[in-house]
Image: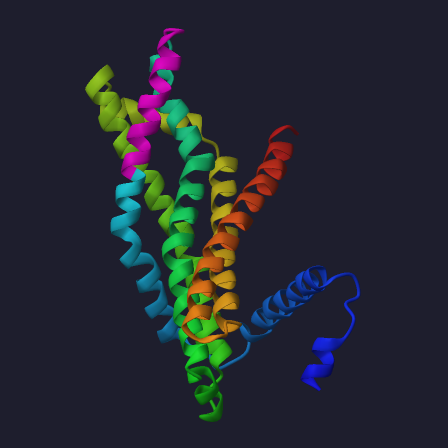
Amino acid sequence: MAEEADDRKPFLSKKIDKFFTGLADAWNFVRRFWQEVFLPPYEFKEVIHQCYRIGVESLPLISLTGFIVGIVFTNQSRPSLSEFGATSWLPSLISIAVVRAMGPLVTALIAAGKVGSSIGAEIGSMKVTEQIDAMEVSATNPFKFLVVTRVLATTLMIPILVMYTDFVALIGSFLNVNANELVSLSTFFVQIFESISFLDIWSSVLKSLLFGFTIGIVGCYKGYHSSKGTEGVGRAANSAVVISMFLIFIEELLVLQVVNAIRGM
């Protein structure tokens, strides 16, 4: 039967048929997640464990990246503003850029590389070594234990990491501004909070939730459907990162259009 299925004439072409079949599989995977997430039993311990792995263990890398982003973007913005004698606007510019776009985007891309690849490789290795099949035999729901917990953890932790990244980036920017313009800490943060609005914070949180869900669901999907031994595990980890980053940029564009439309009302 499998050979007959492989010998069937493709509807459009093999690549196009495979693409749409993959979309259908991904849709069914996401739909199953939303069905399983509300049904008992609830794996609270595993969710907390995954939150620790995704959140706490990512702090060193996120801290360094956010700090460098704040300093670099401040240095890059200063020459342009100094041409117009507007270096006093640096705190406002940095806060808008970090909160609206750079904080969520940088955090999501770092998490896609670190967390997404880890999830894809971990579940993929369990798939090819038949540990998932063993869980099904032992009356354990592997989808709920492996997929639902990890997607919930990424969805919850990425917004928290984004807020932390925003704070670290602003601290890095303050140190740079203080060293060059001698701006005090209180003045710096007063200008920051005067420049950002509730809509900026809301859009940042919304994007963070979408990014976290995307990283978790893509990593789990690629790992859960990996095959061909260790080669398949490496391919699952690699494709999880690439697809997550691609979808993150698409979501960034879509949310930006919605937020700009709301802002223009």
- Between 15 and 37, the residue placed more toward the observer is 15
Residue at 41% x, 63% y is 153
Where's residue 36, x and y in %? 56, 75
Residue at 24% x, 19% y is 183
Which quarter of the rendered picture does the C terminus lie within? top right
Where's residue 237, x and y in %? 43, 62
Specify the farthest residue to the bottom. Answer: 138
Question: Image quarter for residue 129?
Answer: bottom left
Taking the magenta stretch, the answer to whether it contains residue 79 is: yes
Q: Is residue 187 above or below residue 58?
A: above
- Between 171 and 239, the residue placed more toward the observer is 239
Q: Is residue 262 left or right of residue 228?
A: right
- Between 18 and 168, the residue placed more toward the observer is 18
Q: Is residue 183 above or below residue 107?
A: above
Residue at 46% x, 78% y is 127
Q: Is residue 220 above or below residue 77?
A: below
Question: What segment carries the magenta color?
Answer: 67-85
Q: Is residue 206 visible?
A: no
Taking the magenta stretch, the answer to whether it contains residue 233 is: no
Where's residue 84, x and y in %? 40, 6
Residue at 49% x, 53% y is 242
Which quarter of the rendered picture does the N terminus lie within? bottom right
Where's residue 44, x and y in %? 39, 74
Q: Is residue 143 visible?
A: yes
Question: What secondary structure is the magenta-colored segment mainly?
Answer: helix
The number of discs equals 0
Question: Image quarter for residue 32?
Answer: bottom right
Its colouring scheme is rainbow
Q: Is residue 64 left or right of residue 139?
A: left
Q: Is residue 207 left or right of residue 173?
A: right
